[in-house]
Image (cartoon, grey):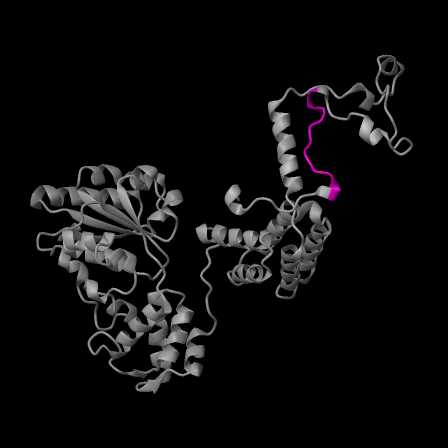
Amino acid sequence: MAGLFEDDEPAGPDALAPAPADAPLAERMRPRCLAEVTGQGHLLEEGGVLRTMLEGGLEQSLILWGPPGVGKTTLARLVAAASEHRFQPFSAVLSGIADIKRVMKEAEERRRRKGSRTLLFVDEIHRFNKAQQDAFLPYVENGDILLVGATTENPSFEVNSALLSRARVLVLEPLTVADIVGLLRRAIDDPERGLAGQLVAVDRALEELARAADGDARRALTLLETCALLAGRGGELTPKVLARAIQRKQVAYDKSGEQHYDIVSALHKSIRNSDEDATLYWLARMLEGGEDRDFLMRRLTRIAVEDVGLADPRALEQCIAAWETWRRLGSPEGELAIAQAAVVLARAPKSNALYKGLAAAIEDVRTTVNQPVPLHLCNAPTGLMKALGYGEGYRYAHDDPAAREEMVCLPPGLVGRRYLEPPDRDPPLTERASDRPDS
């Protein structure tokens, strides 16, 4: 079987070879030069990190981190062309360790025979496990390959630290509505790669389409191509055509990735901050994204005891009732009970006194000598125990109210220790999310 690197294979500029005429619109409109790139101004402006690399050649491996459809693959191709390295795309979804070793061996052979390096573009690099990622290390270190990895997940958690230390992480941002409108307009007007005027669209219609794309250029161009087919040659992009193309907006939400944790953190902190409008928004994002409803109710119940706590103990009852209501009604009716619980928590007074008090008590248990229970608090079910002083001096608070102040219930080494303020001085929330980590 022929190898990946034949003698007559072109170098870097091949990364920008035009797409076939029958390729999807998103592929045909892929930028072929820096001037066609949309967005990422913080990296591509004069003096920007990526622009400097593109103008001066690639000097180090890269990790491109950003949401789908913002140009990670395109930028990798441009970098390959600028550096004149052989561009070799590689899929973490379709490839295993044997494929990695084969590609690495051929890259090593190409450099030995021709003196040329390979730019290996690994899409969705976070899908490789530790052993697979480790397989790249020797070839990155000895210069056989320059690695450009693309990921939608936080590389701090998904890319090995050894590989991460040998690469520069560049953060790509979602495209703005204005960015996407400009891209759509070019696609409509382009006579060579685009629709060549097959669709008529005013800017307002393109703005609606851009908003539906959620910062994803690939999704925007795919929607535009669908609209052109539905409208017919020379047709207009009307609200009806757009609605038929979209059908229902797909909310970008990864229930197992970093976005899941970011959004649930935003929900929790909005409730803590008593912002009921933000609470409903983030809750809606999670509901529409398909978040597990039981997970949501576990988090809301946690908020009831952690952030509302003693300021309104009934908030916990509301959460348990909403949870049971959801389980009885299911979707979509039961989701109203979830929303009610979230807003009740947002509107409730806040106190973290119980949260802090329990943490302080646990810290004392862990760091101090665990002394015996004071004898006057112990029961004396036998004569021997009574003779040894068990229960002696105990005062029944119902009959002797003074016992509440005068009888010591903590072990001797902790007498006087306070974990909670008296109820009439139960403090409001005194710390923000920045003061402590939130799981």
Q: What is the x, y in percent for residue 365?
A: 64, 26
Q: Quadrant of residue 426?
A: top right
Q: Nearer the viewer, residue 153 or 107?
A: 153
Residue 49: percent from the left, percent from the top? Answer: 24, 52
Q: Is the stretch drawn in magenta largely helix, strand or loop?
A: loop
The total number of labels drawn is: 0
Magenta-colored stretch includes residue 89? no
Q: Work out which residue is located at the far front of the displayed protein and give it.
A: 425
Name the residue: 53% across, 53% down. 264
Q: Which residues are magenta?
A: 413-424
Q: Is residue 242 left or right of residue 320?
A: left
Residue 330: image quadrant is: bottom right
Which quadrant of the structure image shows residue 431?
top right
x and y percentages locating residue 194 in the rendered image:
25, 75
Does residue 49 lie above or below 418 as drawn? below
Picture coordinates of residue 161, whole percent (x, y): 34, 38
Residue displayed at 35% across by 64% down: 175
